[in-house]
Amino acid sequence: MDPNPPQQQQQPNNNYHPISIWEANKDRLGTMYQMISEPPRLLSNAAGKPSCCIFRVPQSLVDINGKSYNPHIVSMGPYHRGEPRLKMIEEHKWKYLGSLLARTEPDLPKGLTLKDYLKALEPLEQKARECYSESINLSTDEFLEMLALDSCFIIELFRKFGLLVRFERDDPLVNMVWIIPFLARDFLRLENQIPYFVLLTLFDLKTMEEHKENGKSLSLLALEFFNNHMQRPDHVIQKHHNLTGMHLLDLLRSSVIPPGHEEPRSSNTIPTHTIHCVSKLRRAGIKLNPGKDESFLVIKFKRGVIEMPPITIDDFMSSFLLNCVAYEQCHKSSSKHITTYATLLDCLVNTYKDVEYLSDHNIIENCFGNDGEVARFINNLGKDVAFDMDRCYLAKLFNDVHHYYGNTWHVQWASFKYTYFDTPWSFISAFAALILLILTLMQTFYTVLSYYHP
């Protein structure tokens, strides 16, 4: 017998129809089609337009710099609206709005009411919504109320600091000295912005005519407010009387970008090279001296000397630079001047010794912490940042420094000077060694001479 008899073939069942899992789960298919039809909310389609200018900071930057992007005491706009920790200043927003209305509503019929402010913003609703990278889940009334409240608070505060309106005698926002510095930093957080055209619309209402009589534009009032923390000369601020921006962060960023330092429209044919840290540049004979230009972005290189205008690194400036870099990373039409400057600093600074040298040469004024903390801040400022070095405004400087550093004669001669003449003690040691060498040679000479001529 065959140990493996053939198996009897099973006759096909013509009535058998396998049921697909998707036929049995039609609800899942419906959910998928619904997800396809819904537009993105956390990063809306408007985020890719040039008009979109207010973004959530990328998580990669948040992981590096922590809470530097979150408002600390005041919320502006929808992203942090209603957070309990920001409630204290939220109450004072209504107080400032009340003081603004108190000066206009009693002058009816010529004065303006709260309704007039809301009606002025009504045509701007859709345009303002498209300035945010996320879909804003607020009704029309809630959205316009938020814009009016936040904008009037900013404008009223600027007017009071511009001496156009008096502060109330017991106003705690002024009398408690810690509040205003926090407000100034919070007004410049990327996630905490109001579109500038919204501020300008309310500023230009009839109740603001007194500003034009005093020659105070909104940009001038804003820059004067922030200048309490940047300490730029008054004539520098006056130059930007008619400056505008996408929001307050972009306004202040634009004010530090010097004219004539535009980015190249196309990439260089020769790739741009990075440069070494301060310690290595010094060994190659490259010096760093303080520059005299008004903007810290104006950096020059000539005959082995890098000139960098002084910059004060403190809580305000660190927050400003971090949020500028985040803004330039997100906004497609923004120039990358601050990102370029951050990249340069990151190249120059490796350790606290590099910061120490820049501080000793009056390039960095350290009001931030010890030199190690400043070094960590600078390194984090340029970390995980997308950057096209070939199209930056400092591309020529990067290449010039790189080529100078690569000159063999420069490196050898500078290394010799750095090793033996950098400090008085090294010079004394080198001089003593030279004298010892001369004496040894003389002793050898006379010894040989006495041998042949006793």
Image (tube, rainbow, N blue to C red):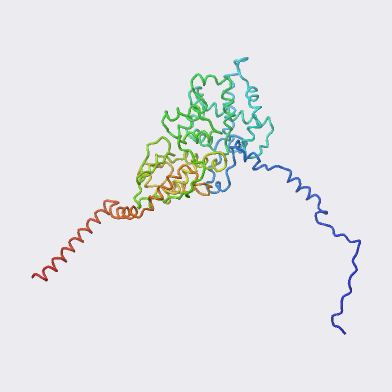
Residue at the spot 23% in from the left edge and 55% down from the top edge: 431
Residue in the picture at 34% in, 50% down: 285
Relative to residue 297, is residue 418 depicted above or below? below
Q: Quadrant of the C terminus?
A: bottom left
Q: Residue 299, position in %: x, y?
A: 41, 41
Q: Quadrant of the N terminus?
A: bottom right
Q: Position of residue 22 (x, y in %)?
A: 80, 54
Report which quarter residue 4 is drawn in.
bottom right
Q: Residue furthest front?
A: 269
Q: Position of residue 437 (x, y in %)?
A: 21, 61
Residue sitting nearer the eye, 204 or 2 = 2
Q: Is residue 273 left or right of residue 47?
A: left
User: Taking 305 as reference, is 121 above or below it?
Assistant: above
Residue beneath the point at 57% across and 23% down:
204
415, above or below 35, in the image: below
Instruction: Give x and y (percent) for residue 423.
Output: 29, 51
Task: Give the image quarter of residue 139.
Answer: top right
- x 43%, y 36%: residue: 295
Please indicate whether residue 17 sits to the left or right of residue 206 in the image. right
In the rendered structure, the answer to whether residue 115 lies left or right of residue 17 reads left
Residue 282's place in the image compared with 393, above or below, is: below
